[in-house]
Amino acid sequence: MVEEDEADLLVRSLEGDGGAFGTLIDRYQRVLFNVSLRMVGNAEDAKDITQTVFLKAYQNLGTFDRRHRFFSWVYRIMINESLNHLSRARRTEPLDEGMPSEGLGPDEEAAQHRLGDQVQSALLELSPDYRQVIILRHFVQLSYQEMSGVLEIPEKTVKSRLHTARQLLSDIFIKRGIAAL
Amino acid sequence: MTNPELIRIMNEKLDGIASPEDSERLRLALETSGEARDAYRKLGGVFQALEQVPMVEPPPDLKVNVVRAIRGLQSVPVRSGWLESFRAAFRKRPAFRLAYTFAAGAACGVIALVLLRGDFSGSTRPSSSVTSGAMMPPDAGRMTPVDRRELHWASGTVTARTLESAGGLVAQIECAAPVGTQIVLDYGPSFSAAGLRQEKGAANDVSIVPGRLSIRVLGAGESGYLLYLTPQAGAASSVRIDVRTAGGALGGALRTQAAR
């Protein structure tokens, strides 16, 4: 039923029904924003990336193969867009006056001690390949098979990458004394 | 013992997909090996910690921004396709070039009348992808670079250049910036705008009022604009580029040939 509903929304979006695409945005914006947030670690950047992903999805809707799952397609766009962002961010140095400080104020300092923030910080220590499997499994709750479809890698590779990522994360948690352990 | 096979079973057990046989093997290993118990406890800790990370609600304006940008995009393929096919038709038939030049000149003349009347405000939206204004774009080879300003932030870049041409000054703006970014070029009373051309990119919200060009980014990807400026007698010369992003503002001045 949900699949039919989504297929209908896609058809109507392709016919120029903005409301139908709006419904797809409603359906996916929360999870896509959170995927991006966990990938890049910054809410403003995550918002920009999520907006760009929806725009790209809309612009390329005609190329989407409806035999496949829409979420796989849109998650793939999200992962690629987040990786592109991380790549650009590494290359680009802030240059001019007027940029807000990256430093943390007292409130942010305190907040960063919370477990959630510590975990996010630990996630950012992982390489993007490992980070994305953790995010897709633990925050989006995709199965190994679904992750294989999104990442376009064999299921066996998904498993080994995920297991290694968890081991690396465990090591980071221990090194930092993260409380859940 | 925590061999790779046992690690696999531990992961699958915690993922909830371990077979009954593997579950039994794990149970036996946990009963007999302290090392296995320690490894399983650590792995379980990773799962627990990840569960503590809350889902964050997306910003309320995220959907609004996307819908607005989509509205801006919708007319683009039709308009640019029409223009490109129109140009291509003339390119393929050299005999028509003269007619094309005449038609372009006539169109510029009409636009020039609008400019001279000063009725220059309001959004140009996607139609800004065509040249508008009284001054035909000069040959890029005849423009001399005067100054350049690059503004970088985590999610975008804006490059502004001033170039001297036979007809005055040309301000070039190239941006690769997220949706919602506001770019403002202030040229004050020193210049009057003679024409604007969108060189590339998405349909953004573009407006010109006397002394100022404003661009609000509505589409993903790179955009590029050329603004043709005519110096005004007696006015001090200055051009300034400012960018407002979701995370802050940045900007700077650009030299102009007329200032020297």
Image (tube, grey):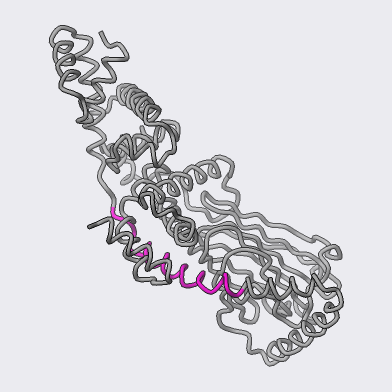
Residue at horizontal 54 percent and vertical 51 percent from the top = B153
Image position, residue B146 (x, y; %): 79, 61
Q: Can you say whether A6 is above or below A95 in the image? A: below
Image position, residue B20 (x, y; %): 15, 22
Q: Residue furthest front?
A: A67
Image position, residue A93 (x, y; %): 58, 44
Determine whether, in the image, residue A42 is placed left or right of residue B1: right
Quadrant of the rendered image containing residue A87: top right
Quadrant of the rendered image containing residue B144: bottom right
B204 inside magenta stretch: no
- Towards the viewer: A40 or A129: A129
Quarter of the picture containing the N terminus of chain A is bottom left
Determine whether, in the image, residue B146 is placed left or right of residue B68: right
B65 inside magenta stretch: yes
Magenta-drawn stretch, dominant element (helix, strand or loop) = helix
Image position, residue A167 (x, y; %): 33, 22
Highlighted magenta segment, given as a residue range: B57-79
